[in-house]
Amino acid sequence: MSHEAILALNPTAVLVRGETAYDANGDEVAYNASAVAAWDELNDLRRERNSLLAVTDWWASSDLTMTAEQTAYRQALRDITNTYQSLDTVVWPSKPE
């Protein structure tokens, strides 16, 4: 479980030990472990999606014109989190030649 996940779900939580989160004063704060796990999975999916987009960023250079297939592929990558929530279930779009 990442600190970032805890912070996203409870901005006052700054430290996690085992299954307990603590705020900046050292006081225990509640959090939902399954929500944190889901957030981590979605974040992993976003990281992979961002990596795939970065590989094709050059297609969008100002001196190039993307094909319709390239544009559709990049849009499908941007929209992937509308359909999928984890790397375990995602079906990636096919990258055009």
Image: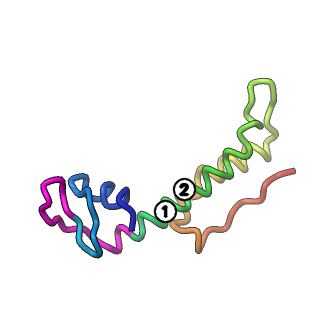
Residue 95 on the magenta segment: no
Image side of residue 18 versus residue 51, left or right: left
* First to last magenta residue range: 22-36
Q: Amino acid at mark 2?
A: Arg
In the image, 95 versus 8, the foreground residue is: 8
Q: Which residue is mark 2?
A: 46
Task: Give percent across and percent down for residue 70.
Answer: 77, 45
In the image, 65 versus 44, the foreground residue is: 44
- Mark 2: which secondary structure? helix
The quadrant of the image that shows the N terminus is bottom left
Q: Image quadrant of residue 91? A: bottom right
Task: Give percent across and percent down for residue 83.
Answer: 55, 63
Q: Are marks 1 and 2 in contact (CB under 8 Å)?
A: yes
Q: Residues within 10 Å of mark 2 (few under 14, many from 20)?
A: some
- Which residue is at 65% across, 47% downward? 75
The answer to whether residue 59 is above or below residue 77 is: above
- Which residue is at 61% across, 50% downward? 50
Residue 79, label in figure: none
Q: Which residue is mark 1?
A: 42
Q: Amino acid at mark 1?
A: Leu
